Structure formats: C-alpha cells, structure tokens
C-alpha cells in the first residue's frame, strides 16, 4: 500500500529577519567631504612639487649635455668656444639665410637642429621643461638658455664688451675658478612676444637683474625653479643658483677672467 508522507512544515521561528539598511546622515557625508578636501589640499601641492622637481632634473640634464657639446666644439675648433652670436657666413657652410648664428645653432653638429638649415630651431634639448614664454611651452619654444659673458669675455681695455661676435678660447677662462664661472644660464623671453631667450648677455646687459629687488623682477635671467635657476659652469658641472648668490657675481667671474 502506497503511503504519502506529509511535507515538513517550515519552522519560521528560526529565520532571521534582515535589518533595514541605514543611510548616511548629513553630518557623516559632510565629514567625509571635509576629509577628502583635507587630503586633496595635502596631496595636490605635493604632486605639483614632484612634477617641478622632475622638470628641474630634466633641465639639469639638458645643461649637462649642452656643456658636453661646448667641450666637443672646442676640441674640434682649436680650443675655441662658439661665438655667442656671429654673423651668418655661407663660406662657413651656413645655409638657409639669416643675419646671425647664435651659439646654440652653431652646436648643430653635436646637437642637431630641428631642421636642415643653419637657422633652423635649436635641438629640443635647448628648451627647459619649466619655461613658459608668453603662454607658450615645450616645442613651441626655441632656446631658453642664455650664454654669459664668459663666452664673450672682456674688451682690450679690461671692461665688459658689448661685442658677441668674437669666439672665446676655453683656455682663456680662469682655470683656477672654473667651478665658479657660469657659461650658460636660464634666460627669460627676450621680448613680450618672443618664444626664445636672448642668445647671450654680457656684463653691460645685466645691470637691471643685479639691481632687482626680487627674482621675479629680473629681465634677462629666469629663476623658474622655485626661485632658483640651473647654471652650466666652465668646469662642466651644473648646479642651481638662488637669487642671493646671483647678486654676488662680479664682472670678472661673470666674464671668466682671473681675479686681480
């Protein structure tokens, strides 16, 4: 005989009741937002400083390679540095036309220009990642570095010369103080519309910078790394310089001659 067993009755007493989900209160939401705001205020400036530190390091690398190119140029030209800015001369192999050839473009055999002519823009290494000229940055810029009086020297009378066309012998730079003598410094835009710095500045040109009250007021040199600028020295080293140190420069140090 077939026996049908009754279906067991579910004991609802053992089932737990899921509690209702509790929503965030307004105070809790405001607290979270405040914490996020505090963290953002801490992190964002730190990220900015890290980025600027990376740009400054890239700038330092640029100047080191420029220093090597200057040394190679001197080795290949009887110890002479390139003239800070010389007249365009087709007899020297200059192509593309132009009135002058700045020192950065003269280094084309070692740091190829951004074009096939002598007057084409300098190699991208001549652009500091932190430079901002009239709202333009990066590949939009030409050369953001300026040759000092050490590449120009002094006139026959021993005074700062305004001429930038005569090449300077590397050996004529005081060998006992080459760690102190700047060759290349970071320059500001040469005008309100320019995308390049001045090719060179002799001692006569920088009086406004030396007399400026703050680094923001300089005309020629750009302390664009948090109030400091990178400098390539005659001994091949690259170091940063603050505004106070810059103001201690004298004509013979800036122009690379022995102290008297």
Image: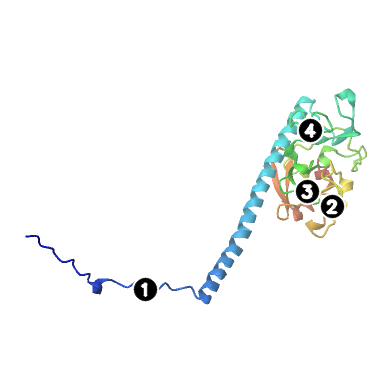
**C-alpha distance separating marks 1 and 4:** 85 Å
Residue 166, x across and y down, in percent: 88, 33
Which of the two discs, 3 and 4, labels the residue nearer the N terminus? Answer: 3
**C-alpha distance separating marks 3 and 1:** 61 Å
Q: Which residue is mark 4?
A: 170
Residue 100, x across and y down, in percent: 89, 34
User: Please, which colouring scheme is shown?
Assistant: rainbow
Disc 3 vs disc 1: Cβ atoms closer than 8 Å? no
Q: Is residue 41 above or below residue 245?
A: below
Q: Nearer the viewer, mark 3 or mark 2?
A: 3
Location of residue 98 by image quarter: top right
Q: Secondary structure at mark 4?
A: helix
Residue farthest left in this picture: 1
Which of the two discs, 3 and 1, labels the residue nearer the N terminus? Answer: 1
Which of the two discs, 3 and 2, labels the residue nearer the N terminus? Answer: 3
Residue 174, x across and y down, in percent: 78, 38
Q: Secondary structure at mark 3?
A: loop
Q: Secondary structure at mark 2?
A: loop
Q: Secondary structure at mark 1?
A: loop
Disc 3 vs disc 2: Cβ atoms closer than 8 Å? no
Q: Which residue is mark 3?
A: 136
Q: Which residue is mark 1?
A: 19
Disc 2 vs disc 1: Cβ atoms closer than 8 Å? no
């Amino acid at each position: 005989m077939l026996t049908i067993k009754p279906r067991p009755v579910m004991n609802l007493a053992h089932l737990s009741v899921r509690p209702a989900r509790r929503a965030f209160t307004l105070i809790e939401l405001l607290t979270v937002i405040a914490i996020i705001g505090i963290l953002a205020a801490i992190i964002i400036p730190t990220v900015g400083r890290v980025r600027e530190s990376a740009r400054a390091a890239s700038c330092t690398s640029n100047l080191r390679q420029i220093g090597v190119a200057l040394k190679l140029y001197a080795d290949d030209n009887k110890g002479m540095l390139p003239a800070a800015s010389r007249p365009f001369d087709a007899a020297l192999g200059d192509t593309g036309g132009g009135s002058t050839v700045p020192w950065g473009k003269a280094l084309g055999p070692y740091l190829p220009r951004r074009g096939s002519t002598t007057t084409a823009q300098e190699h991208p290494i001549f652009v500091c990642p932190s430079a901002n000229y009239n709202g333009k940055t990066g590949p939009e810029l030409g050369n953001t570095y300026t040759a000092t009086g050490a590449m120009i020297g002094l006139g026959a009378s021993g005074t700062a010369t305004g001429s930038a066309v005569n090449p300077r012998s590397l050996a004529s730079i005081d060998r006992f103080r080459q760690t102190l003598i700047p060759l290349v410094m970071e320059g500001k835009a040469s005008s309100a519309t320019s995308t390049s710095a001045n090719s060179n500045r002799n001692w006569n040109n920088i009086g406004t910078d030396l007399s400026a009250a703050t680094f923001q007021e300089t005309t020629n040199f750009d302390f664009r790394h948090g109030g400091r600028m990178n400098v390539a020295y005659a001994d091949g080293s690259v170091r940063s310089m603050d505004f106070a140190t810059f103001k201690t420069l004298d004509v013979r140090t800036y122009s690379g001659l022995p102290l008297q």
